[in-house]
Image: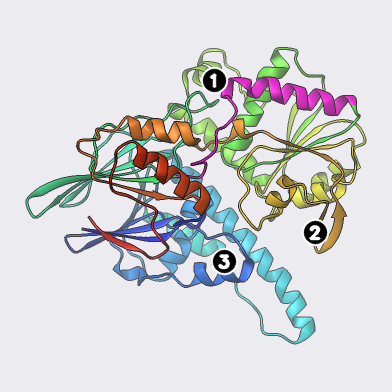
Amino acid sequence: MKIQFLGAAQSVTGSMHLLTVNGSKILLECGLFQGRRQEAFERNRNLPFDAATIDVLILSHAHIDHSGNIPQLVKQGFQGNILCTHATQDLASVMLRDSAHIQERDAEFVNKRHKKKGLPPVHPLYTMNDAAASMNHFVGVGYNRPFWVTPDVKLTFRDAGHILGSAIVILDIQENGTSRRLTFTGDLGRKDLPVIRNPVQVEETDFLITESTYGNRIHEPIGDMKTRLREIVNNTVKRGGKIIVPAFSLGRTQELVYVLHELFNDDSLPEIPIFVDSPLSVNITEVFRLHPECFDHETRDAFLSNHQDPFGFYRLRYIRNVEESKKLNTIQEPCIIISASGMCETGRILHHLANNIEDPRNTVLIIGFMAEHTLGRRIVEKIPSIKIFGEEHSLKAQVAIMNGFSAHADKNELLAFVDGLNKERLRHVFIVHGEPDQSEAFADVVRDRGIARVTVPRLKEEATL
């Protein structure tokens, strides 16, 4: 039995790990690598294996850095099943079509420039048709329902508490008369996040592959989120400014809307309009409404018992139309604009930033992780002058950062998960999905727990289990 780390190794994007057991090839994730454009395009286009040789793909959740290259995999000859939870299947249908739409639009934009310069046309990584075709391979599997992936490998999903439908992947494997368990956290969530349930503690495993996005950082307590958000909104409103929120359409937008709903119900915020300016967020919110089985008790009670919709309260307006989106930048009064993409690399958020970051009355509210080399990271680092659509803009707006909204476990929460494992059985821990400083620091902490074999694998490194 071997595992090869083909993505999200000493980085946080392009999650992809290849397990080989008894002649079968099982791919854990097939995410898009995100970073410098040319490097990202080459890595996503050129898969590090023959897609036709992969027997099955197991997907922990629908975020694009975990699922976004599935249409490319199918396009290049993959014939097997894609196993995930039912909510992930529905979310992936929305996410992958949106990803394809963005790539088609980007290629269209570039080709206009190439045509003027006499350069050959470029082609999108995959198309809407490719994304739709890939959905034929998806098979939904319920939480806690054992499913035989191959005659020798049994899959069980446990709730990861990260986003709607996210799962910890447990593989019970028979090889040469011996039974071993491999557990892959996917992206591990946090206890007491709004909307979704807490992550489940796994107790028994031989091998662990764990994320480490915040392997050396501590988040502010979740209980402080409402207080901090109330302060940021109220202070901005007093200045007469707007709150601009780059937010991932999947998960973070719905959590923020839910907390705002609670604050308004508590009379903690002034009566200002809230706009969710993202067609993708609108579609994803509809998927949320279809899966109350994934909600925590409070959210489920709001939907089922009190007949409320925390994602559609009266102050909230969802924007689909481009013209309506443009009109938001003519508003002079305080308001909250939530828009994608979460790392400020594409989408409508770029227009809102370009129109609002030079006004010191406004606040850019950061509620998610910003990877290296992204516009979002430059805003977090408060670079005085940043480029948007190729033009320089002075960053004069306030920048507020709320890591409490992060759907990723922090150092202590990741460590608590490791501490909950049976150390006598645990043979090897592999630490992935983190920038090197985070992964290495977390590896040291895990070693201090007396676990001898702890590895931070390099890209394409292979380990024999």
Left or right position of 340 against 458 = right
Disc 3 packing (10 Å; few <14; some 14–19; many ≥20): some
Left or right position of 10 against 269 = left
Amino acid of disc 3: Ala
Cα–Cα gap, marks 2 and 3:
20 Å
The residue lying toward the viewer, choosing from 298 and 390, is 390
Disc 1 packing (10 Å; few <14; some 14–19; many ≥20): some
Visible residue check, residue 205: yes
Q: Name the residue carrying label 3.
A: 40
Name the main secondary structure of what is drawn in magenta: helix
Left or right position of 249 against 72 = right
Give the residue drawn at x 79%, y 82%: 116
Please tell me whether mark 1 sits on a helix, a strand or a loop.
helix
Q: Contact (CB < 8 A) between labels 1 and 3? A: no
Residue segment shown in magenta = 212-238
Q: Name the residue carrying label 2.
A: 387
The residue lying toward the viewer, choosing from 326 and 340, is 340
Amino acid of disc 1: Phe
**Residue 186 drawn at (x, y percent):** 41, 44
Up the image or down, 300 lies above or below 343; here it is above
Give the residue drawn at x 40%, y 70%: 48
Left or right position of 230 against 406 = right
Q: Contact (CB < 8 A) between labels 1 and 2? A: no
